[in-house]
């Protein structure tokens, strides 16, 4: 096993454990529009893995995070819905950056634009996949969740008169939540990486998002 692979595996273990720990400690920010949703800081270690090592190690980190949540929380559906939200974000961010690099091949590539495009595609993919998953859960898997969502909407002053209105409002507010979660997780992750870079100057230079394709092939 190469040294880089060993380092990658070690970081997957560390950041997966960090994500599970943050989730267990309820490191969350309330989402006032739909009280049962929380901005989960456990997504930040997953995004750090994405920025440093790329999509595959980040996906493995999220899968371990999902398994850890399932074991520690003692139920399946909630952690599964979290994974269904995070995985499209990872894939979307990577696709956005990859597409931008291909379209701007041979030109000067702005890191800021890379980051923005990654966020946009990550948001789109996360919102689409999460919305489909929520529709399946609300209408097929656990219809009682839709009733609970109706109570949550009433608690913030949104009055609904039908099941369809509850579903529509819930999907809309959840979509806004997911759209906000992507830049929140990615901005905090990149800020932490910049902080780490003060102590370890070579970290940022070796991140996947800042390393060109030909440079990666030569390492």
Image: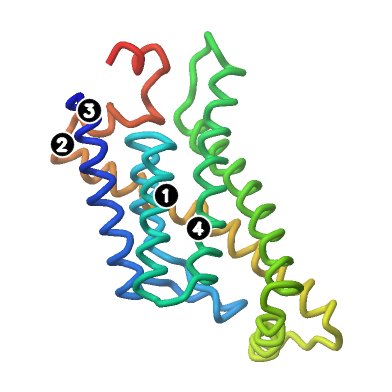
Horizontal arrangement in the rendering, residue 134 relative to residue 95 (left or right) = right
Residue for point 69% across, 52% down = 128
| Quadrant, the N terminus | top left
For the residue pair 26 and 11, the one nearer the viewer reads as 11
Where residue 119 appears, x then y in whole percent? 54, 43
Q: If you read the primary sequence from the N terminus, does the residue marked by circle 1 or circle 4 appear first? A: 4
Badge 4 vs badge 2, beta-carbon distance below 8 Å: no
Tell us which disc is closer to us: 1 or 3. 3
In the image, taking residue 189 as reference, residue 113 lies left or right, namely: right
Q: Quadrant of residue 96?
A: top right
* Mark 4 neighbour density, 10 Å: few (under 14) some (14–19) many (20 or more): many
Question: Mark number for residue 83?
Answer: 4
Q: Nearer the viewer, mark 1 or mark 4?
A: 4
Secondary structure at badge 2 equals: loop
- Image quadrant where residue 117 sits: top right
Mark 1 surroundings: few (<14), some (14-19) or many (≥20) residues within 10 A: some
> Is residue 194 positioned above or below 215 on the image?
below
Q: Quadrant of the C terminus?
A: top left
Q: In the rendering, which numbered label is found on residue 200?
A: 2
User: What is the crowding at mark 2: few (fewer than 14 residues within 10 Å), some, or many (at least 20)?
Assistant: few
Location of mark 1 (residue): 187
* 148 is higher (above) or lower (below) than 67: below
At label 3, counting other C-alpha atoms closer than 10 Å, the crowd grade (few under 14, some 14-19, many 20 or more) is few
Mark 3 or 2 closer to N-term?
3
Q: Name the residue nearer the viewer: 78 or 118.
A: 78
Q: How far apart in space, not on screen, are marks 1 and 3 (Cα)?
A: 26 Å
Residue at mark 3: 4
């Amino acid at each position: 096993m190469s040294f880089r692979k060993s380092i990658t595996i070690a970081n997957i273990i560390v950041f997966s454990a960090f994500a599970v720990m943050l989730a267990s400690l309820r490191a969350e920010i309330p989402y006032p529009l739909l009280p049962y949703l929380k901005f989960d800081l456990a997504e930040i270690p997953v995004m750090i893995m994405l920025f440093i090592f790329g999509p595959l190690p980040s996906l493995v980190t999220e899968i371990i995070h999902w398994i850890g949540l399932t074991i520690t929380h003692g139920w399946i559906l909630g952690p599964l819905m979290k994974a269904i939200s995070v995985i499209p974000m990872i894939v979307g961010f990577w696709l956005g950056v990859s597409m931008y690099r291909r379209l701007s091949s041979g030109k000067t590539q702005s890191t800021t634009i890379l980051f923005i495009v990654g966020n946009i595609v990550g948001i789109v993919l996360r919102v689409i996949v999460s919305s489909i998953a929520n529709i399946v859960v609300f209408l097929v898997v656990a219809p009682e969740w839709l009733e609970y969502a109706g109570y949550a909407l009433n608690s913030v002053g949104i009055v609904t008169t039908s099941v369809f209105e509850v579903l529509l409002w819930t999907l809309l507010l959840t979509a806004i939540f997911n759209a906000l979660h992507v830049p929140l997780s990615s901005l905090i992750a990149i800020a932490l990486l910049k902080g780490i870079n003060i102590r370890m100057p070579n970290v940022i230079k070796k991140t996947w998002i800042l390393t060109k394709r030909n440079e990666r092939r030569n390492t």
